[in-house]
Image (spheres, rainbow, N blue to C red):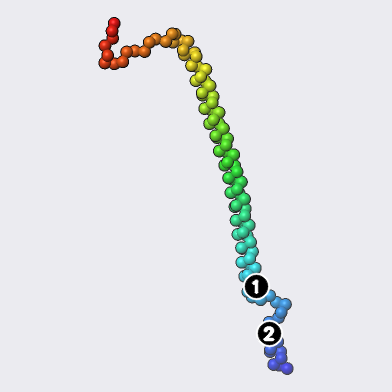
Amino acid sequence: MAEVEAKAATVPDSSAPPAMEKPVNEIMKTAARAKEGEEAAAQHQAEQQRADARTAWIAAGVGVGSAALMAALLYANRAKNRRRDGPEAPPPAPPGRPDAD
């Protein structure tokens, strides 16, 4: 009977978890956390790209608007400059050519 008790003591209890199960669970938890972190990073990067695209369109709109405003001001002032200068004078004679006067 002592032999049966000794064998029973060496046989592991089936209700007790194996020694390797706990590290596997920790590894799985760590892998799940890493995957969640990667998904969150990918989502953040996608949101950032959308925001960057919006910013680029806004900047392009501001640039085009500024150029259009500048062209309109130059065009409007062109008529003022012509009236102020008076009638157009003949162009000056090219250099190196004596005047006939």
The quadrant the C terminus occupies is: top left
Identify the residue position indicated by label 1 in the image: 21
Q: Which of 90 and 20 is in front in this view?
A: 90
Q: In this view, does 45 lie above or below 59?
A: below
Q: Do the residues labelled 2 and 1 touch (CB within 8 Å)?
A: no
The earlier-in-sequence mark between 2 and 1 is 2
Q: In which quarter of the image is residue 2?
A: bottom right
Q: Residue at x 31, y 15 (%)?
A: 94
> Which residue type does callout 1 highlight?
Glu
Q: Is residue 69 above or below residue 91?
A: below
Q: Quadrant of residue 95?
A: top left
Residue farthest along the front direction in this orientation = 100
Q: Residue at x 67, y 85 (%)?
A: 10
Left or right: 79 with respect to 6? left
Q: Classify mark 1: residues with Cα within 10 Å, few (<14), some (14-19) or many (20+).
A: few
Q: Is residue 39 above or below residue 21?
A: above
The location of residue 72, given as percent across then percent down, is: 53, 21
Q: Classify mark 2: residues with Cα within 10 Å, few (<14), some (14-19) or many (20+).
A: few
Q: Residue at x 68, y 89 (%)?
A: 6
Looking at the rendered structure, the secondary structure element under dot 2 is loop
Q: In which quarter of the image is residue 59?
A: top right
Q: Nearer the viewer, residue 98 or 19?
A: 98
The location of residue 65, given as percent across then percent down, is: 55, 28
Looking at the rendered structure, the secondary structure element under dot 1 is helix
Left or right: 15 with respect to 27? right
Identify the residue position indicated by label 2 in the image: 11
Left or right: 93 with respect to 82? left
Distance in Å between CA atoms under marks 2 and 1: 18 Å
